[in-house]
C-alpha cells in the first residue's frame, strides 16, 4: 500500500478536556477528509472518525495529541485537525 | 458520502421504557451532534407510565424515515418488541429507509448522532451505532 503518512502534534486548551462536545467537533472535522486519521494520547490511539474511540482516549485539557493521517489529502487533513485542536471549546 | 444522504441528514429514533430517558438522550445527542440531525424520542407507555407505546413507536418510525432514512435505537425488552411490531405494519418503501441498531442505547445514540451529523448514510450511521458494542470506555 502506498503510504504518505503525515504526523502533527497539537495541544488541547488547558480548560478543555476531550469530552463529548469537543470530541464531536473533532470527529465532524475529520469526517470531511477521505484520509485515514488517527489521534493518539495517553498511550492510546483512536480512529479520528469514531467519537467513541476519541472519548476513550480520556484526554484532559492541556494534553498533547498526536494526529497521524495517511492516504488521500493526508497532509491537508492533519494540518486542519492540528489547527482545530487548540481552538476546541 | 453516498446518494442516501444527499436529501438531508439521517435521523434517529430513540425508544425507551422511560420518556425521560428517551427525551434526555435526545437532548444529549443534539448537544454532541449539533442541530442538523432529526431525532425523535419515543419513550414511556401510553398513559405516561414506564413501558412502550406501540402506536407512538409506529408513528415515530413513519415520521423519521424521511428522505435520508433513520436509525432506530432501543433500550430492551418491550422496546425491541414494539419496534419489531411497528416494522411489520409499515410499507416496504418505509422500512427500506430504516435500520434497527443492536447497540447500547446511550453510547450507540451518541455515535450514531455524530456520524449522522457528518452527512453519513443510513448504513454508516448504523455501523457507528453498533460500534458501541465493542469500543471500550477505559
Image (spheres, coloured by chain):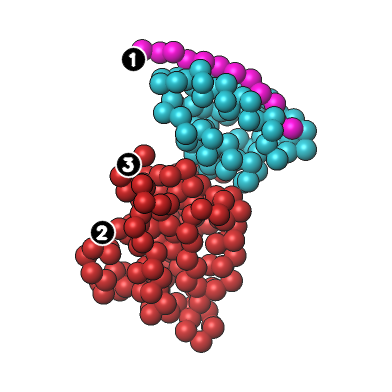
Q: Which residue is mark 2?
A: B96
Q: Secondary structure at mark 2?
A: loop
- Disc 3 or disc 2, which is closer to the eye? 3
Residue B2: mark in rendering: 3
Q: Is residue B31 above or below residue A57?
A: below
Which chain has been coloured cyan in this picture?
A
* Residue extending furthest toward the front: B7
User: Which residues are drawn in magenta?
Assistant: A1-13
**Residue A50 magenta-highlighted:** no
Where, by quadrant of the figure, is residue A42 drawn? Answer: top right
Q: What residue is drawn where x is 26% and y is 59%?
A: B96
Q: Is residue A5 magenta?
A: yes
Q: Residues within 10 Å of mark 3 (few under 14, many from 20)?
A: few
The answer to which of A36 and B49 lies nearer the viewer is A36
Question: Which chain is drawn using red?
Answer: B
Give the Cα separation between the discs numbered 2 and 1.
36 Å
Q: Earlier in the sequence, mark 3 or mark 2?
A: 3
* Chain identifier of the residue bearing label 2 in the image: B
Residue drawn 41% across the image and 28% down it: A34
Q: Which mark is residue A1?
A: 1
Q: Secondary structure at mark 1?
A: loop
In the image: residue B37, left or right of residue B70: right
In the image, residue B71 sits, relative to residue A84, either above or below, namely below
Residue found at x 65% / y 38%: A18
Real-space Cα distance between discs 3 and 2? 16 Å
Residue A42 horizontal side relative to residue B44, left or right: right
The N terminus of chain B is located in which quarter? Answer: top left
Residue A77, x across and y down, in percent: 51, 24
Q: Position of residue A14 (x, y in %)?
A: 77, 33
- Could you tell me residue B43's position as x and y percent? 50, 73
Using the image, name the chain to which the residue with label 1 belongs.
A
Q: Which of these two is toward me, B69 or A54?
A: B69
Amino acid at each position: 500500500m502506498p503510504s504518505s503518512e503525515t504526523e502533527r502534534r497539537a495541544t488541547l486548551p488547558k480548560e478543555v478536556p476531550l469530552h463529548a462536545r469537543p470530541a464531536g467537533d473533532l470527529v465532524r472535522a475529520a469526517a470531511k477528509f477521505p484520509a485515514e486519521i488517527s489521534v493518539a494520547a495517553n498511550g492510546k490511539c483512536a480512529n479520528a472518525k469514531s467519537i467513541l474511540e476519541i472519548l476513550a482516549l480520556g484526554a484532559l485539557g492541556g494534553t498533547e495529541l498526536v494526529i497521524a493521517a495517511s492516504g488521500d489529502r493526508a497532509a491537508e487533513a492533519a494540518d486542519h485537525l492540528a489547527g482545530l485542536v487548540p481552538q476546541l471549546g | 458520502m453516498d446518494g442516501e444522504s444527499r436529501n438531508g441528514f439521517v435521523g434517529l429514533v430513540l425508544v425507551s421504557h422511560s420518556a425521560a430517558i428517551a427525551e434526555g438522550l435526545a437532548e444529549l445527542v443534539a448537544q454532541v451532534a449539533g442541530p442538523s440531525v432529526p431525532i425523535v424520542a419515543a419513550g414511556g407507555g401510553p398513559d405516561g407510565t414506564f413501558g412502550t407505546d406501540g402506536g407512538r413507536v409506529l408513528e415515530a418510525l413513519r415520521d423519521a424515515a424521511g428522505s435520508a432514512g433513520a436509525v432506530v435505537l432501543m433500550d430492551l425488552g418491550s422496546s425491541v418488541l414494539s419496534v419489531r411490531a411497528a416494522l411489520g405494519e409499515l410499507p416496504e418503501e418505509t422500512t427500506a429507509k430504516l435500520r434497527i441498531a443492536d447497540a447500547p442505547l446511550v453510547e450507540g445514540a451518541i455515535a450514531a448522532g455524530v456520524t449522522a451529523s457528518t452527512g453519513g448514510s443510513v448504513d454508516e450511521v448504523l455501523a457507528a451505532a453498533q460500534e458501541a458494542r465493542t469500543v471500550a470506555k477505559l
